[in-house]
Image (spheres, grey):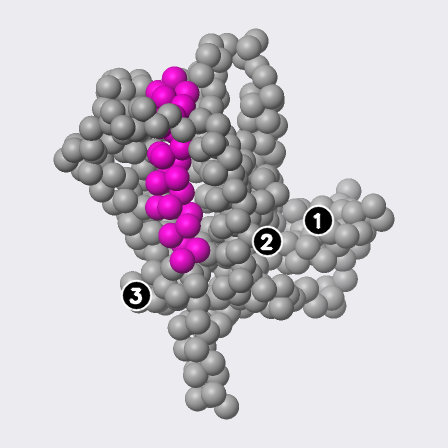
């Protein structure tokens, strides 16, 4: 016996809040991440920096080579995401435009708490670039889902092949689990649940997910999430209708770009450790463990309340790689890593966003 949905089809889909999105595109948004990040780094330096180790470090061509390789990883990451944006918008954007939009998207993510992300800003961005409402929502939600699918799949694969030592040094079995391990497994469970629900909703039964979300939005103690739940319910329906039209090649191409972007992001850590700790073991097992630790660290800080996990990653980094990096050297590596992959987007965003807003304003005037 079928249960009829109580949702009236006369309801209009909720609108995304442009005002809320715009507040994340202000240059002033970089202040708090900078203050938090610098404060934590200064605190770490005061407690952990080993000046003797730094004086004894031999800065040579080997060091510069691996630093350059780490920088190249982030260039590739940006290109992978730009390529993916072109693919999932059916090549609506040129390479230059895609690169510009990814800078702004990453900026909004960098100034938002990691638990919030930059989805709202991304919807605003694409809607101003002449994409239809359905296409805009589909691009953003589909991107979020394939990011989650790859990240969860990679984490599970690495956990099965490398084991619990990927969570922290010395964790040889899950019986040694501590606060890091509990947090890792909790977040991983949430990601698996979230990814499974949205995969089912987008590719198998979007109407069922819509009903569940609408019912949840009517529960009294979830009232503060009512608008978000209703918006997501309609977004799932819209995105599902869009992506079911796509050929298999579309999904493979988008997924490969996603895999490339995530992979080079964490390989940058491998490169920096090789640059500053040349005696580190170069076996495939060690490099895989370093890579997996980067993913595990990202998992643990996934729900950081600070913008872009500023301060949180700086605190976690030394402990995660303590068996590969001397504590006095860890602060230098994490600062370089964050400069490449986080602060670079803060500074780039401050330069790119005013240009983009001016372009949008000019286009608006031309069509009036």
Q: Residues within 10 Å of mark 3 (few under 14, many from 20)?
A: few
Q: Main SS of the magenta segment?
A: helix
Q: CA distance from mark 2 to mark 3?
A: 30 Å
Q: Does label 1 or label 2 sit earlier along the sequence?
A: 1
Name of the residue lying farthest toward the left: 61
Residue shown at the point (25%, 39%) measured from the top left: 67
Residue 223, image x and y in percent?
80, 52
**Label 2 SS:** helix
Residue extent of the magenta highlight = 322-347
Tell me where residue 295 sits by quadrant. Answer: top left
Task: Name the front one of labels 2 and 3.
Answer: 3
Dots 1, 2 in contact, CB < 8 A: yes
Residue shown at the point (34%, 56%) measured from the top left: 82
For residue 343: magenta?
yes
Q: Which residue is mark 2?
A: 236
**Label 3 SS:** helix
Up/down of 179 relative to 68, above or below:
above
Q: Residues within 10 Å of mark 2 (few under 14, many from 20)?
A: many
Q: Quadrant of the N terminus?
A: top right
Q: Which residue is mark 1?
A: 213
Q: CA distance from mark 1 to mark 2?
A: 10 Å
Residue 83, image x and y in percent?
32, 55
Viewed as shown, does residue 124 lie left or right of 305? left
Residue 178, image x and y in percent?
59, 17
Residue shown at the point (32%, 46%) measured from the top left: 74
Q: Which residue is mark 3?
A: 96
């Amino acid at each position: 016996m079928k249960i009829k949905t109580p949702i009236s089809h006369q309801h209009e889909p909720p609108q995304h809040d442009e005002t809320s999105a715009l507040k994340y595109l202000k240059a002033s948004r970089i202040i708090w991440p900078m203050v938090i990040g610098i404060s934590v780094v200064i605190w770490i330096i005061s407690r952990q920096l080993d000046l003797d180790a730094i004086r004894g470090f031999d800065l040579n061509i080997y060091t510069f080579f691996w630093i350059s390789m780490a920088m190249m990883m982030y260039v590739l990451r940006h290109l992978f995401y730009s390529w993916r944006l072109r693919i999932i918008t059916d090549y609506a954007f040129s390479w230059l435009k895609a690169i510009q939009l990814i800078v702004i998207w990453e900026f909004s993510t960098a100034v938002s708490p990691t638990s919030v992300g930059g989805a709202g800003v991304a919807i605003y961005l694409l809607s101003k670039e002449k994409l239809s409402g359905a296409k805009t929502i589909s691009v953003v939600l589909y991107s979020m889902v394939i990011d989650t699918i790859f990240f969860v799949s990679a984490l599970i694969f690495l956990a099965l092949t490398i084991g619990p030592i990927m969570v922290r040094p010395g964790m040889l079995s899950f019986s040694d689990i501590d606060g890091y391990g509990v947090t890792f497994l909790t977040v991983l469970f949430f990601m698996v649940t979230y990814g499974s629900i949205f995969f089912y909703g987008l590719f198998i039964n979007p109407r069922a997910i819509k009903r569940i979300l609408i019912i949840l939005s009517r529960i009294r103690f979830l009232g503060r999430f009512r608008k978000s739940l209703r918006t997501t319910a309609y977004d799932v329906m819209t995105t599902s209708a869009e992506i079911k039209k796509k050929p298999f090649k579309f999904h493979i191409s988008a997924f490969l770009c996603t895999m490339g972007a995530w992979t080079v992001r964490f390989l940058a850590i491998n490169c920096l450790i090789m640059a500053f700790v040349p005696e580190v073991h170069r076996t495939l097992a060690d490099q895989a463990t370093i890579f997996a630790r980067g993913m595990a660290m990202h998992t643990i800080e996934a729900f950081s309340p600070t913008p872009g996990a500023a301060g949180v990653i700086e605190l976690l980094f030394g402990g995660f790689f303590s068996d590969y990096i001397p504590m006095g050297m860890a602060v230098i590596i994490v600062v370089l890593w964050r400069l490449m992959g986080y602060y670079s987007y803060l500074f780039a965003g401050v330069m790119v966003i005013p240009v983009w807003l001016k372009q949008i304003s000019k286009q608006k005037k031309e069509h009036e």
